[in-house]
Image (cartoon, rainbow, N blue to C red):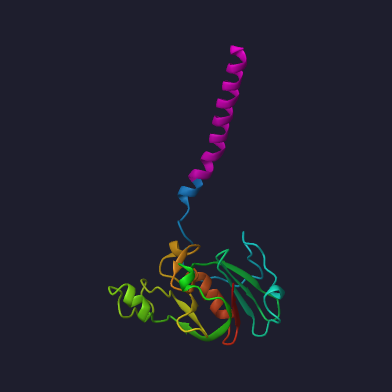
Amino acid sequence: MSSKHMSRRVILSTGIVALGGLAMPSVLRAQNMPDYEPDSPATTVRHNVMGFRRQDWKDHFSDLRKGAILCDTHSRAVHFWSEDESTYLVYPTSVPMTEEFTRRGMTEVTLKRYMPTWIPTPNMRERDPSLPERVEGGDPKNPMGTRAMNLTWQYYRVHGIDNPAKVGRRASNGCFGLMNAHVEELYELVQVGTQVYVI
């Protein structure tokens, strides 16, 4: 009886040590990796679906006129399809903090802004009077990052970000914030009139 208990203990402790040994390299690798993707120029790729669920544009759009962007608040991802279907890209994104800030439905890109100036909305300043009146483009503290695409809805945008830790989280006042390298890539592919659907 004691030998059975001993065998179990030996097996369990051996298993734990073995599992610990397998897990350790992953921990060490994770410590050597940056906390976020560095801001660097990105090259266009045909597909970059990463670990996100692949979407079919036909489930959300009737056509790909001027391309299409799907902003998925549930999976916290932005999908892009080019008009000729040669490019399908997926990016992790920040999403609105609460349902109060979330707007869903069909819209489109009305303006593309290179190195945009950020001006907090009246509601943002009401909630936090300490916010600056404006942050100029190029300032690393600019919450809109390096590129912005305005939508038909006032104050709603797909844009870059000042803090990469916000990506993948409920962290915005209604916009979708991408890593600057990602928004720079998307900015080059999107045109005024590109369809945007928020789900």
The residue shown at (57%, 82%) is: 107
Residue 166 position (above or below residue 64): above
Q: What is the total number of numbered labels drawn onto the structure image? A: 0
The residue shown at (57%, 35%) is: 19
Image x and y of residue 172, in percent: 44, 70
Magenta-drawn stretch contains 23 = yes
Which corner quadrant of the image does residue 92 belong to? Answer: bottom right
With 137 as the anchor, is 80 left or right in this view? right
Image x and y of residue 141, in percent: 36, 71
The residue shown at (57%, 65%) is: 74
Magenta-drawn stretch contains 161 = no
Image x and y of residue 11, in percent: 60, 24
Q: In which quadrant is the N terminus drawn?
A: top right
Q: In which quadrant is the C terminus drawn?
A: bottom right
**Residue that extends furthest to the left in the rendered view of this protein:** 130
Q: Which residues are magenta?
A: 1-28
